[in-house]
Image (tube, rainbow, N blue to C red):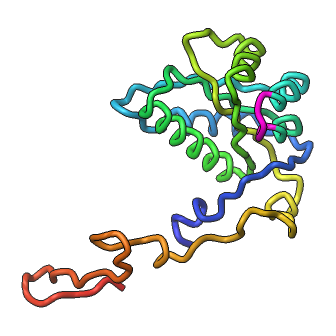
Amino acid sequence: MRETELIRSLRAVRQFSDRQIPDDILLDILDTGRWTGSSKNTQPWNLIVVRNRETLVALSKCGQFAGHLAGATLAIVLVMDGDDPWTCMDEGRLMQNLMLAAWAHGVGSCIGSIYPGDTEQRARELLGIPSNLFVRTALSVGYPAGPQALRLPANSPVPKGRRLLDEVVSWERFGNRRPPPRPSPQGGGSSTLV
């Protein structure tokens, strides 16, 4: 199996079983997230693990696309030091690493957006987050409810699969879909990318 297969197999999971996540697995997920790189190694984050069902249900009402938090085993709420573009990029890196770490243990997750401003304030009050910090994202986390939790419904408006590589990648200039010949290592002739 390719080393990258775990990344390719990651799916958003919004339906969770009742199976609890063992503490050692949860701590490994959190610790893996802690090692995420950040701009100038600022590590501009704190994580809040939420297991209380009432709090999960309340959080699920703090964003238009956060409803799946209500049925999760737990949520990991990302609390960020700022809202500048670099911090937002770091937040995305952290989310993806937490999701991949969970997936490596067979645990599913999905991003729940906390917005707009009034719902962010509600989440802030619910979790005791100081006003100088930002909360925009919570990950629902849990074991998938079954195979159906890994598939889109047949009537889903979301496209399935991925665009072909040659539709996504340009070489040297936008729209150039063929890789140019590259110089050979010996300096003579050229070779092509296969």
Residue 55: quarter of image = top right
Q: Is residue 64 above or below residue 104?
A: above
Q: Is residue 86 magenta?
A: no
Q: Nearer the viewer, residue 118 or 106?
A: 118
Residue at screen point 71% across, 16% down: 121
Rendered residue at 70%/30% (across/down): 114
Q: Residue at x 88, y 39 (%)?
A: 71
Occupied quadrant, residue 1: bottom right
Name of the residue lying farthest toward the left? 187
Name of the residue lying farthest toward the bottom: 189
168 sits left or right of 7 in the view: left
Front-most of residues 19 and 111: 111
User: Is 169 left, or right, of 75 in this rendering?
Assistant: left
The secondary structure that most of the magenta stretch takes on is: loop
The stretch of residues the image draws in magenta is 62-66
Residue at 50% of width from left, 20% of height from top?
Answer: 81
Q: Is residue 52 above or below residue 185?
A: above
Residue 60 position in % (x across, y down): 83, 32
Is 69 rendered above or below residue 99? Answer: above
Q: Whole-percent x and y of residue 93?
A: 51, 42
x and y percentages locating residue 156 in the rendered image: 82, 63
Identify which residue, 169 or 96, lies in the foreground. 169
Report the number of numbered marks: 0
On the rendered structure, is 25 left or right of 85?
Answer: right
